[in-house]
Amino acid sequence: MPKQGAIGALGNLSSKRSAKYGMYLTAVIVLFALIILPPILGIALKWGSIAYVLGRRDLLSRSLIAVQNSFTIALLVSALGVIAGIPLAWVIARSKSKWIKIVDTLADIPFIVPTSVLGYSLLLFWSLPEGLSSLFESSIVSPGWLLIMLLHFTFSYPVIVRVVVGALLDYKREYENAARTLGAPPFVAARTVTFSVIKPSLIAAFILAFARSISETGATFIVAGAFENGPVFIQHMKESLSQGAITQAEYDGATVFTSFMLIIVALLIFLVIRIVGPKLKLPVKKIYPAVEGKLSYTKACLSRNIVTLLVFFLIVLVPSLFVARTAFSAILTDTFAESVSGSGIWGEYWQSLALSYILAGVVTLLNVLIGLPMAILIARKRLGSLFSAVLDLLVNVPLVVPSIALGVSLRGFWKETVAFAPEMLLLIFAHLAITYPYFVKSMSAAVERISIDMEDASRTLGAKPLIVFKTIVLPLTKYSILSGAIMVFTRSVSETGATIAVVSTLKTAPVVLVDWVTHPSQFTASQRGLGSGFLMFFSFLILLALRLAIREKGRY
Amino acid sequence: MPDVRVVNVSKRFGKVVALDNVSLHIKEHEYFSLLGPSGCGKTTLLRLIAGLIRPDQGEIYIGNRLVNDVPPEERDIGFVFQTFALFPHMNAWNNVTYGPRVKGFDMVKAETIGHEVLEMVKLHERLDAFPNELSGGMMQRIAVARALAAGAKLLLLDEPLGQLDAKVRADLRYEIRRMAKDLELTAIHVTHDQSEAMAISDRIAVMRKGKIIQVGTPNELYMEPASIFVAHFIGESNFLEGYALNSDNEGMLVELRKNVKVHAKRNNINSGQKVVLAVRPEIFSVEKEKKEEENVIPGVVERTTFEGTTIRYEVKLINQDLVVIVKPSMTEKWLKVGEQVFVSFPPEKAHVFLYPERGLKDEISVE
Ligand SMILES: Nc1ncnc2c1ncn2[C@@H]1O[C@H](COP(=O)(O)OP(=O)(O)O)[C@@H](O)[C@H]1O
Ligand SMILES: [Mg+2]
């Protein structure tokens, strides 16, 4: 007999149907209780306050215009992002050069910079006298819609590239070879075959970029100037409330109304994409041999690669890193000594930084615990394929709900239901809801890639389900678990919008930084630069450590 | 018109030498097979000819045109992939007409060709089906139809029957050959299955470890294998170790173990050399009484296996060598285990090879 420890007992338990279904049931209940219902109920509970905003024409029209701006920007940015991301993804996936690995790694940088810091960095680069504008008489890009678009482009781009590179690497190259042997020049083969086959990933990239653009608050607020999209409008309302310009009821109404509009329209758009997407045919029928032939070969390719890399470096990478420059010069000043000693404003700063990392760690751990059963449930269709499809769609809900709206709803929900919920708990729940889709989506894809034959083989060799999980599923998906964890961690550390909405006393690092950046008169440039720099530096170190743990094989 | 010449071509993948200085001439209208154990470089050679990969050294000519720098889409070829590589997002009809469309044929012409090739593979009624709705055999025929539709005169097939079950495979191989012949194509067919290559090819190149070791008609390869490996890989052979003695009128005299002397086909191996005698199982006669004078070795039947058309004996010869002998099962009297027999063979059908330096086992291993 094999030794009968706790593992053995659990193993036996795992063979029992009741135990297995108990676990899946728990996963489903957690999904509804913590991830899906709170945001929706939170709005429903405050529904009555909408009357107050309907009574104020000025707020109503501001809100509607803001919502419209949100969607215009999201559509434009995601479309541009996908168009611009495809060539870089192509170069990364197809180039055999070693240098491309560096570009590949660099492409992650805007993803690891907390969005509020990113916003500040872009503001410095494009608008403030320290940046690009120093070369010219006035700002190149003033805060406003164009700067918002640049910002959203910058943080969407790495996610899009990551998704498309993954799809291209998984894609069976043989299809493209087949097209070539049938007479299709490379450009035609890519257009009619490769990108048609990986279309689901292109759509997924578009949706991720879109959802992020709709929901991002912290950084957008920094670069918005007087321009308002949905999240910025809610942020302005919050300020008006604290200045006493509007009543609590009007604030609630404006927030609930705006959130509701953002959620409903976003869901409608996703529904349309879900229905139309699969039917949407890339134009595979029409082929223009002469023009497309010309586009296929050396000269056209070379100029395409150059433009791609220029866009990446000049529009994405350099502006994202620009803030580091101020941090470097700040090191030589008293500010640095002050900051290290933690005096003055820095005491609060270090506390917030610690809170951010603790929060991210807790949220990551919780995700692994409650997200993994859900991922397996979805990937293995354990409760029937229709139910799995529904779950798969529902998991997306927090992704499509704008994060500031999510925060507002969550706050409403938990405050009403659990009157004395500590803020830390609210924070954890909010971050859990926001990060959950990232983890579950990437894990269920990874589990799906493991051939079920392998699990079956292990079962026929006598392994109990839990042992199968430990010996087959876990080792084979360990890189995906790690990279899923990295996404969750990054997202949590950089999350601003929902956090601002949820908390009133606790402050995470992005919350503090937004405060610093939006009150320029109270804080110096070197303080702001150093504050951003520390957050970036430590996040980078943590990610680097995780990356080293993942080594070569982990791509995220 | 496409004959194909491969001249001193080499290709490495990192440390692996996939092709080592290979030369080959495939004639126009020929149905030619590349045969060898898996990993010997067949696919690599085919992909080089298609232009999907580029040679490190050497030249490739298609119909007298040097194509080293010509991309695959301009080589005017049809390629049938091992996994078929049917475009999953297109139905059978769009798969088949893809070639004519990307080559810029007008719609009417593209459609005419589409109908023609689908007619040819007898899958006209399934033109709306997507690849995942087709059986393996159907996918294979669509893959062939698609390769033919582009109008190429050179057809390259990479283990086109490898994914199919035995029965379908046997039917389809003749069909492919017939189509290639009807359309007057030059075809290069990659396979690791010697019976498939023997059945359909005009000529075969036997490959091993990145090299071509013999080119010939199926008949030549079977009757006159140029090496122990070919004698083993094509059909089946018994290998008996011995030493070469002198040659005389009846052929080369070989001394097997325990001083048993037999004649084999004449050869220019010097006497005294260690050699291997290769004899095919069906060449042996096996009798209960001694009828012949020459090349007779006594032995005992150790095992019999009924195989349907044939019956297979394992006979322990007097010198302790074990040989396999195959006889038709319906027309001959069966022998029993333990029976004393006399085994003989005609000298001109037994081939002598130098004993391989690295040993017999290694020489015939397919890795
Ligand atoms: N793209 C590749 N990268 C690395 N090694 C390869 C590649 N293609 C083939 N090889 C190696 O080259 C050798 C020949 O492969 P291949 O031509 O596919 O053999 P065959 O088709 O005869 O089975 C094998 O050792 C294989 O592992
Ligand atoms: Mg092969």
Image (tube, coloured by chain):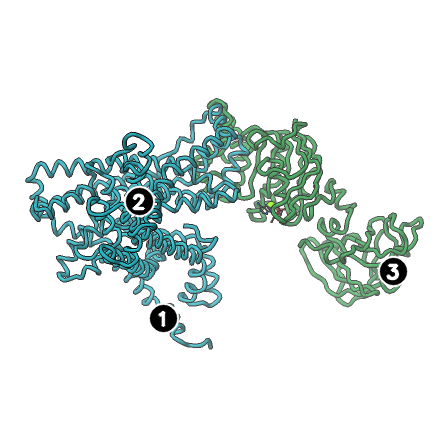
Chain colours: A cyan, B green
Circle count: 3
Local secondary structure at mark 2? helix
| Residue A418 location (% of width, % of height) | 15, 61
Q: Closer to us: mark 3 or mark 1? A: 1
Local secondary structure at mark 3? loop
Q: Residues within 10 Å of mark 3 (few under 14, many from 20)?
A: some
Q: Nearest the camera: A139 or A216?
A: A139
Res. A386 visible in picture: no
Res. A415 visible in picture: yes
Q: Which residue is mark 3?
A: B290
| Residue B194 location (% of width, % of height) | 67, 47
| Residue A236 location (% of width, % of height) | 16, 43
Q: Which residue is mark 1?
A: A13
Chain for numbered disc 3: B
Q: Which quadrant of the structure image shows residue B176?
A: top right
Q: Are marks 1 and 2 on the same chain?
A: yes
Mark toward the start of the polypeptide (1 vs 2)? 1
Q: Nearest the camera: B62 or B30?
A: B62
